[in-house]
Amino acid sequence: MAPDFPYIIGNIHYRDLGHQFPGLIVFTIPASLVALWVFHNVIKHPVIQLLPAGMQQRLRNQTGHFSFLPARRFLAILGSAGLGIASHIIWDSFTHAYSWPWRHSTFLQSWVRIPIVNHRIPMFSLLQYGSTVIGLLALAIWVALWYRRTPVAAVRSPQAHSRFGLAIAMFAIAAAAGTIRATLLIGMPATMARADLYFLICAVTSIAVAFWQLLLYCVLVSSHQVW
């Protein structure tokens, strides 16, 4: 997801910063390492409190200290980040218009009619939306299998206190903010092109609002200023 990090400011106009050279080198790779550090040192422990109690109990033994060192480990982390960024960029080239594969493929430029909604969409868009749905389903299945197979940590500690309701409220606020902003900027979309822009603005805004809410919560919890 590192190439999409510019979206956390809620603006769709800085996408190229994370997807093209030299931004891939001077921004995306360093940003992925910073995000990894922030996750383990600021977000990891507070965010667990936002999960259901059953998940908290299964994660107790998986929240240990994180380090970039030794050098061999750092190179492995850097290689993993590079592989993730490369796969993101390559797949984007097949799911967005005006890329090199799109320009040289009549298949990607073709249109497909969706029977349920009776609308035609470009093949590259179908691949984008389809891969998103498949990815989310795969992630949901993995989480379900992990939950079933991971035993509850046998430690003496207070009963897990869940703020899952707060997490739902935060994501509801983010979704509402995205919907309101997209509606104010685009209105109700009358064409597929407008619908694509509507959903892009809605998604980017929702992601940005959700991220900053989550980060603020984690900073406050980590610093013991609140809660």
Image: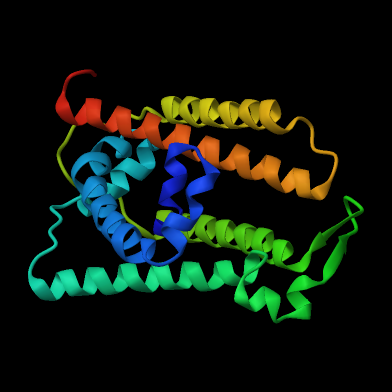
> Which of 15 and 22 lies nearest the eye of the viewer?
22
Decide: is 226 above or below 178.
above
Q: Quadrant of the N terminus?
A: bottom left
Residue beneath the point at 36% across and 65% down: 22
Q: Quadrant of the C terminus?
A: top left
* Residue 84 location (% of width, % of height): 40, 68
Could you say which quadrant of the image residue 162 lies in? Answer: top left
Compared across the picture, whether 222 is left or right of 3 comes to left
Residue beneath the point at 39% across and 57% down: 2
* Residue 85 location (% of width, % of height): 40, 67
Decide: is 142 above or below 107.
above
Q: For the view shown, which residue lies furthest in the left direction?
A: 70
Compared across the picture, whether 68 is left or right of 159 comes to left
Residue 7 shows in this picture:
yes
* Residue 194 location (% of width, % of height): 76, 43
Could you say which quadrant of the image residue 161 lies in? Answer: top left
Residue beneath the point at 28% across and 74% down: 79
Could you say which quadrant of the image residue 110 lies in? Answer: bottom right
